[in-house]
Amino acid sequence: MGPARTQMYFLPADGSVTRAFRTGISLHSHTEHSQERLGDLPRYLERMPVVAQFLQWERKRYHTKTGRAMDFSRAYWRGPLCARSAHDVERLQIESLGLRAIVSLTDHDNIQAGLLLQQGRAFGEVPISVEWTVPYEQAYFHLGIHNLDPVRAISWMQTLSEYTQAPNPAEFGHLLEALDGDPGVLIVLNHPLWDMAGIGSTRMLALVKQFLRTYGHHIHALEINGLRSWQENLGAISLAKESYHPLVAGGDRHGLEPNATINLTRAATFNEFAMEIRVERSSDIAVLPQYREPLAFRHLLCAWDAVREHPQFVEKQRWVARVFVLCDDGVERPLSAVWAKGAPAWIDPCLNVVGLLASPPVRTAARLASQATGSGTP
């Protein structure tokens, strides 16, 4: 492959550039259908004042009572937004820029959101997409598989899920080749340098380069991720130059804040946009103002969206109805059922700390401090 063209614009400074485009594309965001595993949660909680001490006490209490360590990998949470609400959050932001919106929702190993939004619509109006988990040696990658053929989407999802559960490297290339054979499908390596398996940045970089050397001819783009650091995204830019891939924008929204990066295009449909990336190998990316907020506080805001009450969602307004755990009898239950007598008393104070840190005054102070020290993103 020859060199690809990727152009990045930073709004609001480059705001006038949107007039040169017809459509904004939101790639990579999540809904209530996405299972967000909590295995890594303790290392984030341990960095938080007050919360870390309560967590330590609870771990000791649990071990004394059960003789086992707390296993957060048995738990997951679901986002607060249904498919329609998640689509609208992205659509409204793009339309506020004077652009027509196309939104590709990509839940983890699940296409239910896209299927629901397809109902009553013409084929192709709303892409059916997924963030596919691909085990690879000691690590795993997330591939954004966008715009599956509605007629074959369910069977494709079954095939992809079977591979995730029982990976067979000899078959992986054939699966990618078959997906690549549909000219409307866009295959994106999401957050390519995120060390999700905790194997170390050096080993992770070696594996992603090996992965791209082996399968890169069936991958159409690498991702600039709206919830990863600018330093990591710069690494993705360098990786894309080395592998001759264009970059696309992936916001990775999980809460209520809309994606911090979108693609700009003159295409009218997702099929046309896929052709721009795949054939013309040309991409235009807008980095939106919220990306300039300190990343730690944007992560906190996402966490606050996950745990705060949402009165507008009657059946799942409280976070205990959106967090699930695998119980000893092998059944997954929401915490609202597991904690029949209510949550442990220490949890509400911890949630109050999260809410305080995610509040607008604290975030504003953090942004001003970041600007004063010159440590912010572009």
Image (cartoon, grey):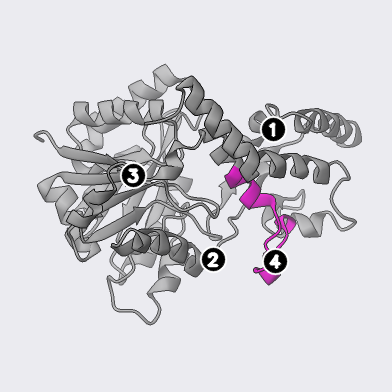
Residue 227 drawn in magenta: no
For the residues carrying marks 4 and 3, which lies nearer the camera in this image? 3
Rounded to the nearest whole Å, what is the CA distance between mark 1 and mark 4?
26 Å
Q: Picture coordinates of residue 251 (x, y %)?
A: 41, 47
N-terminal label among 4 and 2? 2
N-terminal label among 4 and 3? 3
Q: Picture coordinates of residue 192 (x, y %)?
A: 36, 34
- The residue at the point 22 percent across, 65 percent down is 269
Rounded to the nearest whole Å, what is the CA distance between mark 2 and mark 3?
28 Å
Check disc 1 and report the residue beneath it: 45
Amino acid type at mark 4: Pro
Amino acid type at mark 1: Leu
Taking 304 as reference, is 183 left or right? left
What residue span does the magenta drawing correspond to? Answer: 301-320
Local secondary structure at mark 3: loop
Local secondary structure at mark 1: helix
Tag of residue 82: 2
